Image (spheres, rainbow, N blue to C red):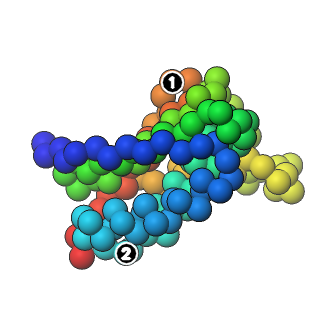
Amino acid sequence: MIIEETNTMKMTSEPQSISLIEPIVIEVFERYEISKDIYGNVLVALTEAMNNAIQHGNAFDSSKSVCLSYNMCNSMLYFTVCDEGQGFNPEVIPDPTDPQNIDKPNGRGVFLMRRLADEVEFEKNGAMVRLGFRIQPN
């Protein structure tokens, strides 16, 4: 197994931090020469994870941080998002495709992460999510 360095950054729990995601994803794709085929999936899933950490995990508390890290392992690109909140049980999130939930404005983040990433793991009672994407070189 080949494991490359892990890169970690800390961000404040403010909506503006979400705008930092796209430049990070672009840098990772360029650095590791990853095919753009999965760019959209990575960007949307990671944005959802960050939004959930800021909004639900840390309740927009700017004194709390969200840690974002990424690493490569063989043919997988992993992003980990960790907040300082109490966590949640991802298994009890209502299905947003259920007709009774279609009009609800929230509840699609975990659903999107699970559909867009090849691997999704929740740890620390849901306060940490690890998203894995199979990569193809350019």
Question: In the rendering, at what x and y percent does residue 113 appear?
Answer: 55, 51
Question: In the rendering, at what x and y percent does residue 72 appear?
Answer: 26, 51
User: Can you see residue 120?
Assistant: no
Q: For mark 2, what is the residue?
A: 36
User: Can you see residue 4?
Assistant: yes
The single residue placed furthest to the left in the displayed view is 1
Q: Nearer the viewer, residue 53 or 94?
A: 53
Asked whether disc 1 touches disc 2, contact meaning CB atoms under 8 Å apart, the reply is no
Q: Quarter holding the N terminus?
A: top left
Q: Does 105 sit above or below residue 28?
A: above
Q: Is residue 91 left or right of residue 59?
A: left
Dot label at residue 124:
1
Amino acid at pointer 2: Lys
Question: In the rendering, at what x and y percent does residue 4 appear?
Answer: 19, 47
Residue at the location (62% across, 33% down)? 64
Q: Is residue 54 left or right of residue 41?
A: right
**Which structural element holds mark 1?**
helix
Q: Is residue 59 left or right of residue 76?
A: right
Graded by Cα atoms within 10 Å as few (under 14), some (14 to 19) or many (20 or more), the crowding at tag 2 reads some
Q: Does 96 sit above or below residue 80?
A: below
The single residue placed furthest to the front in the displayed view is 63
Residue at the location (65% across, 33% down)? 63
Amino acid at pointer 1: Lys
Q: Quarter holding the C terminus?
A: bottom left
Residue at the location (86% across, 56% down)? 103
Residue at the location (67% across, 39% down)? 62
Q: CA–CA distance between discs 1 and 2?
A: 31 Å
Dot label at residue 73:
none
Question: In the rendering, at what x and y percent does residue 81 appear?
Answer: 49, 41
Graded by Cα atoms within 10 Å as few (under 14), some (14 to 19) or many (20 or more), the crowding at tag 1 reads some
Q: Nearer the viewer, residue 119 or 43?
A: 43
Dot 1 or dot 2, earlier in sequence: 2
